[in-house]
Amino acid sequence: MSSITGITRGGTSWTPAFVVDINQGRCIGCGRCYKVCPRDVFELVDRDDLDLEDADSDDDGDDFEEAPGMVMNLKDMLDCIGCEACSRVCTKKCLTHAPQAVAA
């Protein structure tokens, strides 16, 4: 099945990759993704309100899943436009993106 594609102003084909997941165990709640997102995709929530038992810890050995404070959550991932700006500013590489199949 083919993916959604677009064409840039320069005529180049482009395949957007939409946010599909966020690793909240790795997220430090910095808010960079929230600030750069042109849509209403993210929200900060209290880490204590989330079930992070199955979350992966950070590759650096830091244990963010035990840290108190805020963490980013996907508020409305269906509003994502696939620009991937959030992934470019995320220092912890928390976000996962994937192309979307064209609906029949």
Image (spheres, helix red, strand yellow):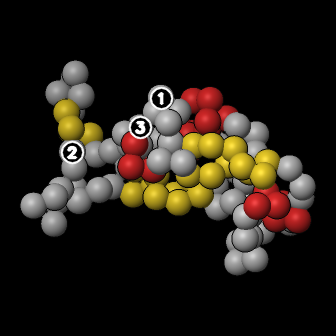
Query: In x, y percent, where is residue 46?
Result: 78, 52
Left or right of 27: which side holds 86?
left
Give the amino acid type for the residue marked by disc 1 in the picture.
Pro
- Specify the farthest residue to the front: 49
Q: Which residue is mark 1?
A: 38
Q: Nearer the viewer, mark 3 or mark 1?
A: 1
Left or right of 33: which side holds 46?
right
- Is residue 59 something one can see in this rendering? no
- Rate crowding at label 2 as few (under 14), some (14 to 19) or many (20 or more) other CA atoms within 10 Å: some
Give the amino acid type for the residue marked by disc 2 in the picture.
Thr
Residue shown at 17% from the left, 56% from the top: 102
Total labels drawn: 3
Which mark is drawn over residue 83? 3
**Cα distance, mark 3 to mark 1?**
9 Å
Query: In x, y percent, where is residue 57?
Result: 78, 68
Give the amino acid type for the residue marked by disc 3 in the picture.
Cys
